[in-house]
Image (cartoon, helix red, strand yellow):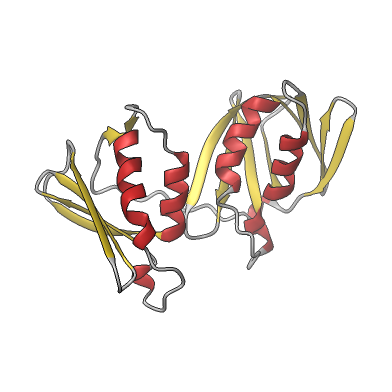
């Protein structure tokens, strides 16, 4: 299997996904990302069993393929390559080789069957709002989230839909931050807790623009 990318086309989505891969390696496979190439696009997926991020990268391959690669090592390699580099990932047996110009990097892979895929739920609510507004809401409240508190429900942010408004509440038991905004689709009532790591990753991925977020 051989997949080719332009460095910049691969680095940005890889940076999104690598942040989710588990660093403490409670399970070795959680420090890996999954690459699935099909129909002229490569899907990159990372998970820590609590949250999962999938994104797309533009690339070409000689066949449909699946491979797991160590997230941090691959990200370090991509960052170190010169801008505009053409890179190839070649998978043979239990190893994968990353080639770019005269550089060669050998990485150990793990079985694709070991990589956990979270099941997509049946969504109860769907909201549409501006990325910049939602990011600002998270930034104004996330500093109050608890960290490693035995009251696990404090280690995140409460997202609440009520009366045409989206509200986010965060507290560590000593202080509290609340922010809200009006948005379409926020009818009825619904509450859910977003884990701390997910809040940070979502904030990092959002742009400060009027682009739509669902």
Question: Does residue 79 appear to the left or right of 128 in the view shown?
Answer: right
Asked if residue 176 lies left or right of residue 111, the reply is left
Name the quadrant containing residue 74: top right
| The C terminus - image quarter | top left
Residue situated furthest left in the rendering: 163
Picture coordinates of residue 95 (x, y %)? 83, 46
> Residue at point 41% right, 52% down?
199
Q: Residue at x 71, y 36 (%)?
A: 79
Asked which quadrant contains residue 128, the reply is top left
When the figure is inspected, residue 60 is found, relative to residue 51, above or below; the finding is above
Residue nearer the viewer, 155 or 105: 155
Residue at image coords 27%, 64%: 176
Q: Could you say where residue 100 lies in the image, as x and y percent from the top left?
A: 82, 28
**Which residue occupies the foreground of this view, 99 or 75?**
75
Quadrant location of the N terminus in the rendered image? top right
Number of callouts in the render? 0
Left or right placement of residue 120 versus residue 133 in this view:
right
Q: Position of residue 173 (x, y in %)?
A: 30, 74
Looking at this view, name the residue that lies furthest to the right: 102
Q: Where's residue 65, x and y in %? A: 68, 35
* Residue with the most extreme top position: 84
166 with respect to 149 (left or right)? left
Q: Image point 37% across, 63% down: which residue?
A: 145
Q: Quadrant of residue 48?
A: bottom right
Q: In this orientation, does residue 170 appear?
A: yes
Q: Please tell me which residue lies in front, 157 or 60.
A: 157
103 over 151 or under it: above or below = above
Residue 214 visible (yes or no): no
The front one of 208 and 115 is: 208
């Amino acid at each position: 299997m051989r997949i080719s990318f332009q460095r910049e086309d691969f680095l940005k989505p890889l940076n999104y996904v690598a942040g989710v891969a588990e660093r403490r390696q409670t399970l070795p496979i959680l420090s890996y990302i999954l690459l699935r190439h099909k129909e002229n696009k490569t899907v990159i997926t990372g998970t820590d069993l609590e949250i999962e991020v999938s994104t797309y990268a533009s690339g070409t391959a000689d066949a449909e393929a699946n491979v797991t690669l160590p997230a941090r090592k691959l990200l370090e390699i991509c960052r170190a390559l010169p801008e505009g580099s053409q890179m190839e990932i070649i998978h043979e047996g239990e190893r994968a080789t990353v080639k770019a110009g005269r550089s060669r990097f050998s990485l150990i892979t793990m079985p694709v069957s070991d990589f956990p895929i979270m099941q997509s739920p049946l969504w109860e609510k769907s909201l549409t709002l501006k990325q910049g507004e939602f990011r600002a809401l998270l930034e104004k409240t996330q500093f109050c989230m608890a960290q490693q508190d035995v009251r696990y429900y404090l280690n995140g942010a409460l997202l609440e839909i009520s009366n045409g408004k989206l509200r986010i509440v965060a507290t560590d038991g000593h202080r509290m931050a609340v922010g809200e905004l009006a948005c379409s689709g926020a009818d009825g009532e619904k509450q859910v807790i977003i884990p701390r790591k997910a809040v940070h990753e979502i904030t990092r991925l959002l742009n400060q623009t009027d682009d739509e977020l669902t």
